[in-house]
Image (spheres, rainbow, N blue to C red):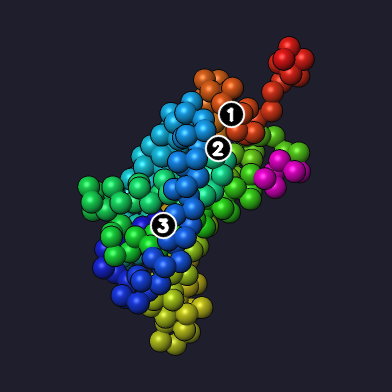
Amino acid sequence: MHIAEGFLPVAHCVAWYAVSAPFVIHGARKVIEQAKEHPESRLLLAAAGAFTFVLSSIKLPSVTGSSSHPNGTGLGAVLFRPPVMAFLSTIVLIFQALLLAHGGITTLGANVFSMGIAGPWIGYWCWVGSNKLGWHRNVGVFLALAFADLSTYLVTSVQLGLAFPDPVSGIAGSVAKFMGVFVISQVPLAIAEGILGVLVFRLLTDVARPELERLGVIKPSMSEAVAR
């Protein structure tokens, strides 16, 4: 969910840039480290970035100054951990702002925080929690993508509420109003994104199993483990 160019007050733009910058820098280091130490993972990194770019480019008009769309960041968080997605999401958001007029440069910090930081971390925690509970891998993938999407919308609602508090009910009332409007489109999108994520993950399991095993995303089957 992107906040449009010039929609946030200057002070808020600067603040969100400052908050997001350390995460993006750390993520860039992780991407470089991954690419250098394991060159074979570059295609999978590119696929994670492309998945995010394609899904988050599906723009549906929402509240004035924003848009609703799937994000795709949950998949990358599951594959490479959330720090990587902070950097990849920044690249995606810059391209979308410059080429598609989607989001903006002034609001880049805010959009990176909601889509590239908060979303991937919450999605990743859902994935980890699902694994600890012993749930099926597909359930974990679904929850990771769906909640990465939903948490992005929740954070965006908070960002807009902070920038434009309601004259009567204040920040809390404004946040609640934004959430109420976003939920109409975002819940179905989150469910659809979770289902799509499961299908894509199944495909990756078929074509890139060794790499997913190296990353620790999936465990070798019993027969493969014995053979090794």
As shown in the figure, which amino acid type bears the numbered disc 3? Val
Residue type at numbered disc 2: Leu
Q: Residue furthest bottom?
A: 168
Q: Return the x and y of residue 11 as percentages of the image width and height.
A: 35, 77
Instruction: Say whether disc 2 or disc 3 marks the residue closer to the N-terminus.
Output: 2
Q: Looking at the image, which is closer to me, 89 or 147? A: 89
Q: Residue at x 35, y 70 (%)?
A: 13
Tell me how far mark 3 sits from mark 1, CA to CA.
26 Å
Residue at (56% x, 53% y) in the render: 121
C-beta proximity under 8 Å, tags 2 and 1? yes
> In the image, which residues are magenta?
128-133
Please state which of residues 40 and 16 is positioned toward the viewer in this rendering: 40
Q: Give yes or no for contact between labels 2 and 3 (Cβ–Cβ under 8 Å).
A: no
Residue 212 marker = 1
Is 93 placed above or below 10 here? above
In the picture of the structure, the residue carrying the numbered disc 2 is 79
Q: Are marks 3 and 1 in contact (CB under 8 Å)?
A: no
Locate the N terminus by quadrant. bottom left
Where is mark 3, residue-wise?
112
| Dot 2 or dot 1, earlier in sequence | 2
Residue occupying the point 30% across, 57% down: 103
Residue 78 horizontal side relative to residue 8, left or right: right
Q: Secondary structure at mark 1?
A: helix
What secondary structure characterizes most of the magenta part? helix
Residue 189 percent coordinates (x, y)? 46, 47
What is the crowding at mark 2: few (fewer than 14 residues within 10 Å), some, or many (at least 20)? many
